[in-house]
Amino acid sequence: MMVMKMLMMRITLLCLALPCLANTCTTARDPARISVAGGSLTEILYRLGAEKQIVAVDSTSNYPPEASKLPSIGYIRNISAEGILSLYPTLILGEDDIGPPAVLAQVHAMGIDIEILTEEHSAQGIIDKIRCIGSIIGESGKANELIKQFMLPRIDELNILTKKGRLANKKILFILSLQAGSPIVGGTGTSAGGLIRMTGSSNAMADVAGWKATSTEAIISAAPDFIVISRRGLNTFGELDEMRLHPALRFTPAAKAGNIVVMDGMQMLGFGPRTLDAAVTLSRRFSSTKP
Amino acid sequence: MVNLSDEKTVSISGVSLSVRIGRQSLLDNVSLNVKEGEILSIIGPNGAGKSTLVATLAGDMTPSNGTISYDNRDLTELSIQDRAMIRSVMAQSQPVAFDFSVQDIIKMGWVRGSDIESTSRYATALACIVEDCSIAHLLHRKFNTLSGGEHRRVHFARALVQLWRPETCSSRGYLLLDEPVANLDLAHEIRLLKQVRSLADQGVGVLLVLHDLNIAAKFSDKIAILQAGRLACIGSPGDVLTAERLTRIFQIPISVDTHSLSISYY
Amino acid sequence: MRVIAHKAAKVKNLSANQTLTLISLLVFAVAIATLACASGSFDISLWAIVQGQASALENNVFMQIRVPRVLLSGFVGASLGLSGAALQGLFRNPLADPGLIGVSAGAALGAAIVIVLGSRFGVGATLGAFLLPMAAISGAALVILLLYILTSGFGYQGVTYMLLVGIAVNALASVGIGILTYISSDSELRGLTFWTMGSFGGVTWALLVPALLLITAALLAMVPAARALDLLQLGEIEASRLGIDVGRLRYRVIFAAAVAVGASVSLSGMIGFVGLVIPHLVRIVGGVHHCYLLPGSAMAGAGLMIAADLIARTVIQPAELPVGLITSAIGSPFFLWLIFRMKKL
């Protein structure tokens, strides 16, 4: 009984201490064995040459392809406490949708450091993320090098492409997938919204908050110039032509002109280094005057 | 109505039961009593209120006025458990949701506990009653696989188990039977009624609803005729069963041989 | 063994076969619980724990992650199995399952309201932890009461009717959850998905202990109703003629089942079909008497739920499957088979 009481007290204390899980960007006590939850974090660790320290990844970590050969801790929002612990990590790095919170509390109670990186859907957010991971694993030098060599040139390029709001009049519709006949679109506050902002264009669905199923009429009246969709999302429509002729989309300027851009979903929405490439590619595409 | 204070009876006095829809009265000022050791048969046309009378006596429904008493105790003062000890009811059968065996159904009538002592008493009761009702061959069958007549016989056995008094190794109390012989073949009908007779001889007070006037004439000590919720007449079979009265109530020509008390209506 | 069984049978109205089955079920539940405590993606030697030679991490994983999880799954299984058996008895309907007839959905809706609206109106974490099971229990109780009112006139014949009402109640609850999903923020949404999927992960002693007490109390309240539930199968009027206070029985079963299901759902989310499958299996093995069926369903429910969770957390380790997926995968074909069999009868 006494043991039980002590246990309960300890757990209560730990639960109260949960806010300390927030990101501090300070060097971890021991980054030797890292369990990662979040595709962008895995990508950054690889780019920093820290891939040998990764002991497990979540199911969104599919880039670089060899990352998916690592043991999987499952879906980022539904990780298993014992599953993670069985790999004896010394550090857990997670994007901010890692969960469930109760499982994190359990793992933290076992004395494992957890660093959760808050997500900011902008170019600066990506830079900050790289810098933060660099300092957590004690590789700030490499992180700065990566930023200087690869990230800043992309940002410069983006700035040129979007100079003077050249693309601001382009309306972009981001579709995640087709669910029960309705396209799920990215509105304000979503990663897709952030990506569109990075390309210097405007979100055709700015009136919508979050990811929402949208009606045909709302899409037609939004009149997007371009439609952006992930490869997996395209599969829910079928072939590109089927998507172009889908009743919800066929009357949009984008579908009429064939302005549908298909790209890897994690590259666009993961907000790792690759997302800058995606933004550049999209910006270029939006500024090209394709017939 | 005066209750004879020493005598053990179930009596109802001035019981009325009205149904709100259309202010229709199901029972209207009915008074009667059944003494221990006595068989009272209720006869009457369809819809006269016979089943309602049984249900009201059993305590399923509360009369809008009048009182019901068992052994001079008002029914409303008896708890649900006490009622189960003093009277048992055999109703028209209905299906049982799960696959209970005949044995299980009969045992449901045992309202006297499940400690070791009562369990051995139950064994005695069961042996006697199964013998009397000749249902030994049915005991291990599933209740839901039996025929309508077999259902009745099992329910009858259950009603007897409920009235079993371990102290005297016989049944005691009041038995309310609503058309107990429906679905029974001739042999089983007579056997069951003879059993009812011998229960009455042991001291059980019996009230039963019957359709067959000849059977009622043969096996009853008293007969009551219900008509449109009212008690038309109550008394000994010889007094009640007259050709003139039966013809009036059942509205077909009925003749009665007063000597052998046999009734013909075709 | 035989002698004990015989003696127990005499007092408890159990046949020797039923007593042996109950003992076997208990042994099975304890054995599977031991196995579940000994296995998992984290490699722990049970023997080392017993001898006190395990490392601090091993001890912690065992005591704070695995044991609470096994206990929770066992108790949730027991409460769903027993509630299913008791509700089937009360409704005189072999298809009454807390999930199927919408009781779990009612509990989930109660929980969802607290998750989404609670954070809006600034309900603190401590109060929230207390409010959540209460809301789930109230949701479950409301649904059972509604069902009882809607189906009482139909009795045994109302099997189809009850399922239709269940579909409607499930739909209503999912509309409620759907609306809450729509207005919820991202983090609230994550909480919601957890509740609708069902999982035993992340349970702590602080949440577990009160729920276990509630569930135990509910289970203990239901078991003595065994004989009354037997008699109820003759019909409500017949049961009351045999000395059963049907009104009190009704509220006892409804309230206890609501507490058991509500407390379970508030900790583990919706887990389907357990309440349907378990009582039927137990009946097939040892008979329909509630004095056997109720404890038997609790034990079998505990054992099978622990086994289902063991599969859920080891089959694709270190990741895990939602346990509701496994119970539904077993339960839905069984449900079809039951309907098929009822049609033949």
Image (cartoon, rainbow, N blue to C red):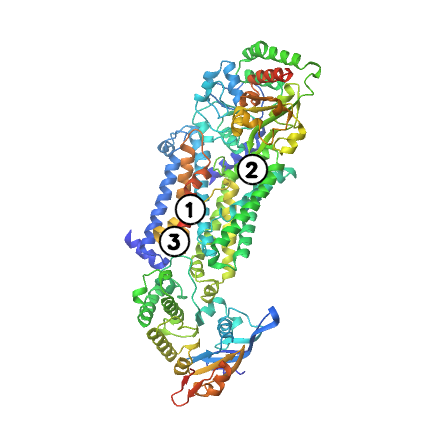
Q: Is tag 2's residue or tag 1's residue first in the polypeptide sequence?
A: 2
Across and down, in percent, residue B1 comes to: 54, 83
Task: Answer with left or right where residue A174 lies relative to residue C343.
Answer: right
Q: Amino acid at mark 2?
A: Leu
Residue beneath disc 2: C192
In the picture shown, does residue C186 fall above or below C254? above
Q: Is tag 3's residue or tag 1's residue first in the polypeptide sequence?
A: 1
Q: Quadrant of the C terminus of chain B?
A: bottom left
Q: Amino acid at mark 3?
A: Lys
For residue A266, which quarter of the picture?
Answer: top right
View extreme (bottom): residue: B259
Chain under numbered label 2:
C
For numbered disc 2, what is the local secondary structure?
helix
Residue beneath disc 1: C336
For numbered disc 1, what is the local secondary structure?
helix
- The residue nearer to you, when weighing B169 against B133, is B133
For discs 3 and 1, the disc positioned in front in the rendered view: 3
Is residue C21 visible in this depiction of the protein? yes
Pointers 3 and 1 in contact (CB under 8 A)? no
Chain under numbered label 1:
C
